[in-house]
Image (spheres, coloured by chain):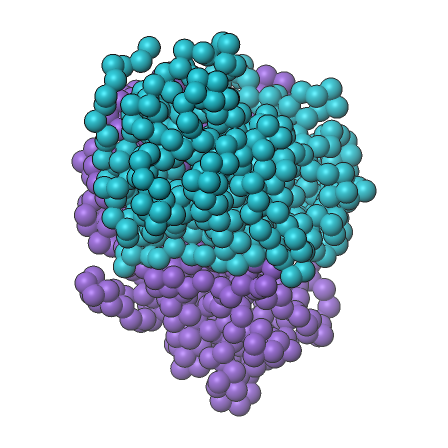
Chain colours: A cyan, B purple
Amino acid sequence: MGKGTLLYAQSGGVTAVINATASAVIQAARARKVKVLAARNGILGALREDLVDTSKESAAAIRALAHTPGGAFGSCRYKLKSLEQDGAKYQRLLEVFKAHDVRWFLYNGGNDSADTALKLSKMAAASGYPLTCIGVPKTVDNDLVVTDCCPGFGSAAKYTAVSVAEAALDVAAMADTSTKVFVYEVMGRHAGWLAAAGGLAGAGKDDAPQIILFPEIAYDEAKFLARVQETVKRVGWCVVVVSEGIRHPDGTFVADAGAGKDAFGHSQLGGVGPLLAATVKDKLGLKVHWTVPDYLQRSARHLASKTDLAHAQAVGTAAVDYALKGLNGVMPVIVRTSDRPYRWKIEPAALDRIANAEKTMPKGFIDKSGYGITAACRTYLEPLVRGEAPPPYRPDGLPNYVRLRLTAVARKLPPFG
Amino acid sequence: MGKGTLLYAQSGGVTAVINATASAVIQAARARKVKVLAARNGILGALREDLVDTSKESAAAIRALAHTPGGAFGSCRYKLKSLEQDGAKYQRLLEVFKAHDVRWFLYNGGNDSADTALKLSKMAAASGYPLTCIGVPKTVDNDLVVTDCCPGFGSAAKYTAVSVAEAALDVAAMADTSTKVFVYEVMGRHAGWLAAAGGLAGAGKDDAPQIILFPEIAYDEAKFLARVQETVKRVGWCVVVVSEGIRHPDGTFVADAGAGKDAFGHSQLGGVGPLLAATVKDKLGLKVHWTVPDYLQRSARHLASKTDLAHAQAVGTAAVDYALKGLNGVMPVIVRTSDRPYRWKIEPAALDRIANAEKTMPKGFIDKSGYGITAACRTYLEPLVRGEAPPPYRPDGLPNYVRLRLTAVARKLPPFG
């Protein structure tokens, strides 16, 4: 290929397998003799000219990235606005790219990142600079459109299904004299994909979770409480999986009631899980426990899905291939070609179909009661949590996660802003 | 051995490996041709004559118990009072035991259960009924005296160490533009063993967790906040592991401030994790996230410690051996004979040394700052989280946990109470 550098950056909430994508990107580029720089903390590293030379990392370290959670190069929550509003920043990015001979930019994130990659590619084209921009999918929320699923989601889904199943065994064992209701809060501000994954914990009528609360369905307290009570009466206990993003019929987040200030003016960082738990306790008088796994659900590389890992690596490899082919403004997406046996392939999709859009659960995935998942939903979800891909463990019992050297690239430009 | 039945029961909070003890008990008894009944929901099952015939379970199911979390026969939170106060109940227990020819009673639990087993053995002796009572250790709190450690703790400790390490990688990746402080709440109302286990996530000065709050050390808000701020300044982010049982200098639980009613009279089931998070947000203005894994930490069989599993099985096997030898009123305890290499053995210890006592962290295990663990503590903890013992997984990606048949034994007595 000759001259030119590939720049890779991570964006948004990290996942158990985003580093597996990074690993695949770097390995694919090395195989093609292409130099890879990484921006520290996503697009901010590019703006600040804060770049890492990945050629200083050993082959073993790059391989080990595939089993290391978090975001090895740092990620960011930072959205560039329109070309009109943030023109100076896009201009700066092009200057940094030119200074380091960046011809290929791979932005690994969600729909915001797809939007940034798309805008950058347009600006470069307009200015005559030869730059190929690729969006690489990643999000535990599984809310990107076009792609069948998002790398990162399958592992978070597996973590959720397994954790719900395990906690349910605990609750079932103790319910006679202790906790009757267990509330499990999952991520998903707008889409109920992870809540649905909790449903994989059991398939029988009385299996946990007996109740799933989706952000797609308006929360009805009276109906919810009646169902909890009825479940406890019938089963002896009840497991509730609730999405952080459930809303009242008027559209306000249920969690917001718990996120204000208390009588003393102190912040209440409740979350909807403890809030529902308190409601069950107050209104039904039942003993209740709750969990908020928070970041654990998206960083649990120890329980990654093998399918998800394969997806994460495949989109990384394809992204390099598309970049070097000059497929500008695309994202490698996962296309499902068969449910049973599960088969999939990677294809390029135009970023303008993906940027800023959001995929919620289809109606056919939530059952008539509104509290469970359908067979169609199971058919969709099951392949994504299939297979185990545990990290190697050290003799001291902890996973052998890698720490990169992160060698800085010398700056060539004056600081920005 | 001939005539006589062995009764096994589970008590208190269940663990990832209490069923491994049950599995070992049943296998050891089967090998000796001894019939095993199990009481449903602990001692309550014995009082109610609600018994399960374990001979109806297949050998494969009993083997599978060793990799299944929860409490397969049901557990209970129920403490019998003194022989004087609860005499009728102890009398009933003896009647049930006589009706089912129970000669050996194995009670698998913590110090309350050791107390119950001890009282029962005394009462039986006083009444001339030949009964051998054995306490079998179990608790994620690791607070039993005499034994070097408690089955169940090692797996919860491993879960905690791994989860803290994984979440820390997430926080480190995002800290530039997002969460700066992450609060991880662990179980341990009186003893800081699980909080200390969080310390295994890292060993370097700036590794997570940078702050551990133990119930053994009075909580000092100003000092804590200063340390958080100083850590964020130096490292860029800060991970705090906090025991649910931390107290103010006056001895009141810090969590109680968050467990009352809000201005509207609703229960606040906050937990100390979200409470500390709110404090950090209000006083330092830092973005904060928190997790309360709750039951997940004690039911995560998918991440069990191999050492812990071996302990859990060994105490079960030894308990049957001691029972059949007539070693009345003892508990098989774990004796550490060497740190490096880690070596241990099982020995009988008198229940009256164990009942109702509680082991907190020794002073030498908490460092001078009060916020970290010492090298001696690491030396103690590390062997307990060593080794992996994952369950088999089903083709659909979930662990293949067993569900027993739980065939009821016909009642021979009138109902009690």
Residue placed most toward the observer, A139 or B245: A139
- Placement of B394 over or under A400, stated as above or below: below
Whether residue B193 is situated above or below residue A36 in the rendered picture: below
Residue B37 in which image quadrant: bottom right
In the image: residue A78, left or right of residue A204: left
Give percent across and percent down for residue B406: 65, 69
Residue at 40% x, 33% y is: A104
Furthest residue toward right: A368
Would residue A387 be seen by someone viewing this image from the given angle? yes
Quadrant location of the N terminus of chain A in the rendered image = top left
Q: Give the residue at x 77% y 42%.
A: A364
How far across and how far down the image is residue B162, in percent?
A: 37, 48
Q: Foreground residue, A25 or A70?
A: A25
Q: Is residue B249 left or right of residue A373?
A: left
Q: Residue furthest bottom?
A: B2
Viewport quadrant of the C terminus of chain A: top left
Residue B308: in sight, yes or no? Answer: no
Q: Which residue is drawn at 42% across and 75% down?
A: B317
Q: Compared to A407, does A47 lie above or below? A: above
Task: Determine the residue positioned at 73% across, 68% down.
Answer: B414
Q: Which residue is at the front of the view, B25 or A322? A: A322
Q: Quadrant of residue B409?
A: bottom right
Closer to us: B3 or A75: A75
In x, y percent, where is residue B140? 42, 53
Question: Picture coordinates of residue A400 (x, y %)?
Answer: 31, 52
